[in-house]
Image (cartoon, grey):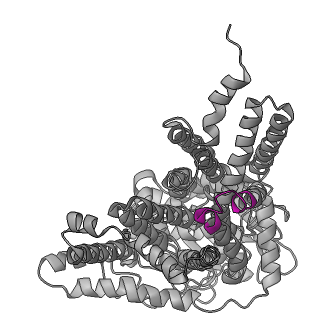
Amino acid sequence: MATDTATTRENRYGAITDRLPANAALLAVGLIVVVGLVARLVWLGNRIAHQDEARVAYWTLRFAETGTFEYRAIIHGPFLPIVDGWLFTLLGPTDFSARLVVALVGATMPLAALLFRTRLRDSEIVALAALLAFNPLLLYYSRFMRSDVLVAAFMLVALGGFVRAYDTRRVRWLFVAVGTMALALTAKENALLYPVCWLAAGVLLLDAMLLRDRARGVRARETLARLGRGVAGISEDDDERIRHRFGGIDRWGGRALVVAVGLVLWFFVVIVFFYAPRGGGYGPPYSAGGLDLYSSLGSLVGGDPGPFVAVLDEATFGAWESFANQWGKSHDHPFLPYLEHYLKTMEAGALAVSALAVVGTLADRYRGGGPRPLVMLGVFWGVFSVLGYPIATDIKAPWAAVHAVVALAIPAAVGLALVARWGAEAFADDDREGVALAAIVCLLVVAQVGYATGTQVYVPEHESTNNQLVQYAQSSTGDMKTLLNGEVATITRENAGTDVLYFGKEFFMARESQANQPGNTGKWFDRLPMAWYIEQQQYAEGRGSPGVSVTSRHRANDVGRTDPSALPPVVITLANRSGNDGGNASDIEQYLDGYEKHTFERYGYSSEFVVFVREDWQQYADVESRVFDALDPSSGDGSLSASSGHPSLDDPVYG
């Protein structure tokens, strides 16, 4: 039997201290992606929709139903509505399909680590992939219909593309970088903050480089010239190579100009495709004015460039104006409370990454060859994100910490790989204490990540104010979804007339058709997430069906004067609690004999509302449900008025 000597162990594990065996890093990253994908897809559709998810999903479903869309800054970039609109058509509108795109992008984000192989050790590449795949904060918001993970993933690939272009001198990587940067801008506008952070970090890196070179006797002009040649892909002795490869400086400059023009065109192709209006847009108060991307392309082919030029203007200048009007204003809030919330979120969802980032930063900064620019870029980028987002964000939102986590994952990967290498080297040297110490550190990291993932990602306490990963507008009662997708869905399919009555000023809308498209939607936002689930039934019934009919009242007398047999089978109102004095369950419960009462939380806590469901609704399914309206001239005592309800998909208002 062969003995496992210190020498053989050193030979076996020595590669870990430098490079892993051929393709080992690639295989390891691939395995991480597969496991990360499973982690994101399991129970993906179980959680009831957060209010923000429901809002964007609703308007996305309206796009799938009508083909009408234009950029609205309030729901951020058009990437998710357009791509999810296609998915809703293929898979149907559900929480699972709404979150699928984000889950897929979040699961494949670790592949971006491979773009940095010229700058990081293989062990650091694998560590970076693992941190991106299994960080609790990234995992939670990869299972959430929101664009922050999309932006982080696209911009990380863009950074990797620029690094690869610099290191390999291959133009295709510039197109990868510019294309994914454009995609990030279509996902969410805060992608603009990434190059700002990179440039600020670059200034600090340049300053450090100038100081270091000056200490070595190198003048600043020479350092800057060297950097300029590096960016251009040439060196002092490259004149002959340029003549041979490009036929002279002029030809090289011409090629560079062609590439630059191509990059600009590629960037705007992506931007225009997503930001261009579809189906004529929404009409006033929005600005698309009947424009449509695809019909404008047809006009362009037919020799009329006017509509296409108008679409270009709307997709660029119009989108920028909309963004500036919505988000260009300063957010007047105190910095320290927002910073405190941000740091608490980092503690809850990125404690391991933060601690490892400190280790990696110190180890890389004081290593023999000096700090590596990429690692220091991640450090500065992460610090700027931690300090900057509390200023830039308009609410205390845990998803904002996603952007700092992705940045700090780079130095954290250096720290994690360092611990792993220490353990491998200690094993090769028969250093049991060193092996034990490295194992303890790794186990602590795994335990912290596992605990946070289990308690805050898969089994979160949504009603707890201490769960930093869960934003307040997440409902804490998942049973609401069971009711809405179960009994309420069945009722809306089989009931005649009005299916759902919203009662109280909190939910009242003078015209239900206000919710047909974005704009002046009144109190519709307060109906979320219920409105998203009810709209799913409208889509399921399809064109030509009576549709799901919804109405609202804020006078209890209207409910009281309605024939009980004609009351809608589903009534939604606020619970009877302090502050709910604009109409609540106590005002109408006396008229709802035979209704089963279900109490839920719209948000995390202190937001109770009630859903009344008629227990024997099948008995009255053929009765034309309507609610008396005292303000309707056609309604007299004992008569009923039909609400406008929710029009069917054949209604002209659907375009």
Asked if residue 326 is positioned above or below residue 462 in the image, the reply reads below
Q: Image check: 1 left or right of 303? A: right
Q: Position of residue 82 (x, y in %)?
A: 42, 67
- The residue under the point 75% across, 67% down is 603
Q: Position of residue 398 (x, y in %)?
A: 72, 68
Q: Position of residue 267 (x, y in %)?
A: 36, 74
- The residue under the point 78% across, 51% down is 452
Which residues make up the magenta segment? 362-377
| Corner quadrant of residue 196 | bottom right
State which quarter of the image contains the C terminus.
bottom left
Residue lying at the far front in this picture: please name it: 217
Examine the structure image and report whether residue 27 is included in the region drawn in magenta. no
**Residue 554 visible, this angle:** yes
Examine the structure image and report whether residue 368 is included in the region drawn in magenta. yes
- The residue under the point 41% across, 82% down is 282
Q: Nearer the viewer, residue 369 or 614?
A: 369
Q: Image check: 408 left or right of 434? A: left
Q: Nearer the viewer, residue 541 or 100?
A: 100
Residue lying at the far left in this picture: please name it: 303
**Residue 641 visible, this angle:** no
